[in-house]
Image (tube, helix red, strand yellow):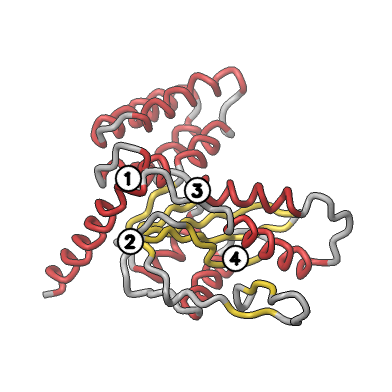
Amino acid sequence: MKDFYFPRARGHQGPIRRDLSHLELCAIFIDGIEFKENLLVVALGMDREGKKHILGLWQGATENSTVCNNLLDDIERRGLDMGKDYLFVLDGSKTLRSSVARKFGSDVFVQRCQQHKRRNVLDHLPPEHQEAIDARIRAAYNIADYDKAKESLELTVRYLERLNPSAAASLKEGLEETLTVHKLGFYGLLRKTLSTTNPIESCCSVTRTVTGRVKKWNGGDMVQRWAVAALLRAERKFKRVKGYREIPKLIAALQQKNLDRKDVAA
């Protein structure tokens, strides 16, 4: 999708571009979703007041580097300030992580979605072990202290190495980045908001409801146009994120990161 379009007023044909240059964002969520047998990679921004904004989407057969790079190139072209520091909340895709690093540097703040991590680990386990292991991982993520949460997860990794090495490797991969919000010192509702890509999944559920009665889809272009329209419909009902009063703490962490980078450069 070359630009993130949305419909004009009734009676006026053609799309218009959504300018992003006015947005003061501090966090960006990106997730790949299955929609009408298509993969859509969706980006959603959170501003300094805790308000959410649909930034764009890109369509592809898989969540590959071309799709992810094109999405980020698109939001840059439409005015997003690429010189700022953001917290990226990602679905766990290595490809998406690499694309974000390409655009924003290898030291970018990334929070890997904890729910995606839990699901990925469970996919390696037989049903009789899934509930117990998921409870252990969930309990670790609920620990407020970063060091204690990490220690608990590493204990589960060692346990899984005896039970199922593939599940252990899945949990170990990117483990540190599933605890970024812990490391930044968030303990309350904002940590819950920023620890998963649920804000995207929630608005995509609205998209599926809006398009549920469509019986025939005439190609990917129709899927794309309907998905955009439905996402923007969901956006009109967005509320501020839970824990928005803690956002100044996130902004301070991002500003400190920028200062540290300048000190290193000097």
Q: Is residue 239 above or below residue 4?
A: above
**Is there CB contact under 8 Å for labels 1 and 4?**
no
- Measured as percent of width and height from the top left, residue 37 is found at 76, 54
- Counting residues from the N terminus, which is met first, the one under dot 1 or under dot 3? 1
Circle 2/circle 3 CB separation < 8 Å: no
> Vertically, is 112 above or below 84?
above
Considering the numbered disc 1 on the image, is that residue within a helix, a strand or a loop?
helix
Q: Which of the numbered marks, if any, corresponds to residue 108? A: 2
Q: Nearer the viewer, mark 2 or mark 4?
A: 4
Q: Residue furthest front?
A: 10
Q: Which residue is mark 3?
A: 197
Three-letter residue code for mark 3? Thr
Does label 2 or label 4 sit earlier along the sequence? 4
How far apart are the alpha carbons under marks 2 and 3?
A: 17 Å
| Within-10-Å neighbours for mark 3: few <14, some 14–19, many 20+ | many
Dot 2: what SS? loop
Q: Nearer the viewer, residue 232 or 132?
A: 232
Q: Earlier in the sequence, mark 1 or mark 4?
A: 4
- Give the number of the mark in front: 2 or 1: 1
- The residue type indicated by label 1 comes to Val
Can you identify the residue that label 1 sits on? Answer: 181
Which is more toward the observer, 41 or 98?
41
Residue hosting label 4? 57
**Residue 231: image x %, image y %?**
63, 59
Point out the tag, 2 or 3, that comes first from the N-terminus: 2
Q: Position of residue 92 (x, y in %)?
A: 48, 49
**Residue found 46% across the figure and 23% down from its top:** 135
Q: Mark 1–mark 3 contact, CB under 8 Å?
A: no
